[in-house]
Amino acid sequence: MSAMSDVSRAVVTLLSLTLAACSGASPRAQAPAERTASVAAVAPAPAAARAPALKELPELGALFHAEQVAGTIALLDTADGVVACSDVARCQRGAIPASTFKIPNALIAVELGVLQDSDSAMPWDGKEWSNPDWNRDHTLRTAMRVSCVPCFLAVARSIGPARMQDFLKRFDYGNHDISSQREIFWLFGALRITPLQQVDFLRRMDEGKLPVSERTLEIVRDVITLDVGPNHVFRGKTGSAGPGDSEREWYWFVGWVELGERRVYFATLIDEHAPDVDVLAVRRRVTEAILRKLAVLPT
């Protein structure tokens, strides 16, 4: 079977998991030796048409524990179409997207002409923010790099709630819910997305399957590029929501690695940590350790 066929089957898996999570359903428990979790079917289907199992890789949990944190990583490798998670239950649990939402925010802004390109000006609003990197003028590229909340708040205001809601539905982004009436709804509102949904969204973005132009996609792919090596391109975005932002803490790192035609999409979410752990550094460090262990990133 071809890699593209496997990827299509993997997408069915992601959609089935999303529907199961929204309905409160959970996958049927398996014997530990099976190392997989079955996906609850939305409707009966012939055996040959059913989505493949979601592979669980609990051994990757040791890399989280070594950093004194708990969480999960969702992975989709186009080489074999396999969708995998280190902790399936956590992969199906929705969380505030926090600054990972800057990816769809930027896509919508560029598509609508609110921002023209990666060098579009994002002026400082003149307010003193807690992060000194936000207290200056930015471009889309530099604002993404320092995760400038006020910059993207101004962008979201220019997009407006009606257009934002329309795009999130067309993107099928998380639960689509921006009804909280909070301006920074991606930090304080009811919007939720699971690690599996993050991976599916990134795959559809990278494959040009979102309702935006290829030019828009290229601009946003460019501004989330973290590293380019001889044989790989590494793209990603962090996000965090902590005390004061939400009822609990969430720390994200999402993105993908390009290895020629092969893609490995990932979404790491940390939701517990020991005191005094610098989770902002750990979220990327643990992700890169996992990707190196899986021979996705070079050692």
Image: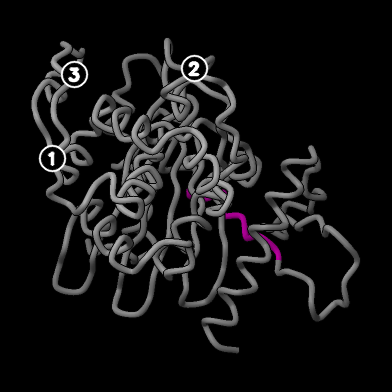
Label 1 packing within 10 angstroms: few (<14), some (14-19), many (20+)? some
The span shown in magenta is 53-60
Task: Check residue 59 for magenta coloring.
Answer: yes
- Closer to the chain start, of discs 3 and 1, is 1
Marking on residue 131: 3
Residue picked out by circle 1: 121
Foreground mark, 3 or 1? 1
The amino acid pointed to by label 2 is Ser
The amino acid pointed to by label 3 is Asn
Secondary element at tag 1: strand
Q: Nearer the viewer, residue 67 or 145?
A: 145
Q: Marks 3/1: CA distance?
A: 19 Å
Residue at point 78%, 53% (across, down): 31
Q: Marks 2/3: CA distance?
A: 19 Å
Question: Number of numbered discs present?
Answer: 3
Residue at point 67%, 62% (across, down): 13
- Closer to the chain start, of discs 2 and 1, is 1
Marking on residue 246: 2
Secondary element at tag 2: loop
Q: Position of residue 295 (x, y in %)?
A: 34, 66
| Image quarter in which the N terminus is found | bottom right
Q: Residue furthest left?
A: 136
